[in-house]
Image (spheres, grey):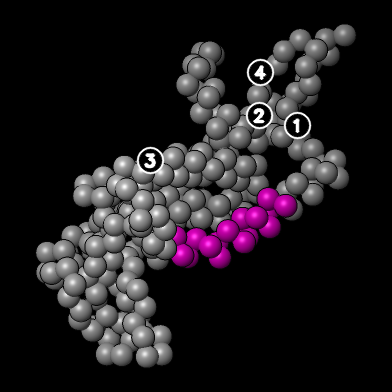
Amino acid sequence: MSTPSRFDRLFKRLLAQRRTDQRPGAAPGRRAADYQPIRGWRPSLFIALGIALLDWSTKAAISASMPIGAFREVIEGRVAFWHVRNPAMILGLWANFPLGGRKVIAFIAAILGILVLLQIVGRAHRLPNHHRRWAWVFVGFVLGGMLGNLGERVLHWGVTDYLSLRYGDYWLPPGNVADLALFLSVPLAIPVIVFEMMGRARRGRGTVPVHPRGPEPNTA
């Protein structure tokens, strides 16, 4: 068996995977899932790429067919395309900051967000199979929203917003597919948190899964 590289070990630690190497006098890992390959990042990445591609294609279509500032109702009194270019961050935050400062904030937020998502994928790896999918979808939606908007900022530091809904007598500020994915990820976070708490409760009661490689040899 080949020795894992330093990058492999670092990646596994970022995914919240415990050490599994057996050292003299050290207790084995207490989770059987730690000895299994982590594959949750694959479906999450596929979902994220699908959302990002849909977001970029719709933004390109709007930019090609409508000038900035144009307003067009697609469902009368309900839904409209309202083409605007948003130079601020999410929810209009830091709009008054200079461009360089906003770029630094976006870069730091992206790095922190990716680290958090890696931890979620890794911890979901320890959940039962029917619970893991919720975490994969949640991570895919969040990552897809991040890629959609941040990918556009790389080109011209501005986000194309176009989808507006009417609330009462007012049209709400427009958004896009990436914003919609981020919005939908909020309720998805609830079952992910609940399943993680349930897993912690089971481990707290001393429920330890059987080691998949069988019992440890007696070295006494």
**Residue 127 visible:** yes
- In this figure, which residue is indicated by the disc labeled 4? 21
Q: Main secondary structure of the magenta part?
A: helix
Q: Amino acid at mark 1?
A: Arg
Q: Residues within 10 Å of mark 2 (few under 14, many from 20)?
A: some
Name the residue nearer the viewer: 90 or 203: 90
Q: How far across and down, in percent of the image, does residue 106 sit?
A: 39, 45
Which secondary structure lies at badge 2?
A: loop
Residue at 34 percent across and 82 percent down: it is 171
Q: Are marks 1 and 2 in contact (CB under 8 Å)?
A: yes
Reading the chain from its start, which is encountered first: label 1 or label 2?
2
Q: Amino acid at mark 4?
A: Asp
Q: CA distance from mark 4 to mark 1?
A: 12 Å
- In this figure, which residue is indicated by the disc labeled 3? 104
**Residue 79 against residue 144 in the figure, above or below:** below
Residue range highlighted in magenta = 181-197
Q: Which mark is residue 30?
A: 1
Q: CA distance from mark 3 to mark 2?
A: 32 Å
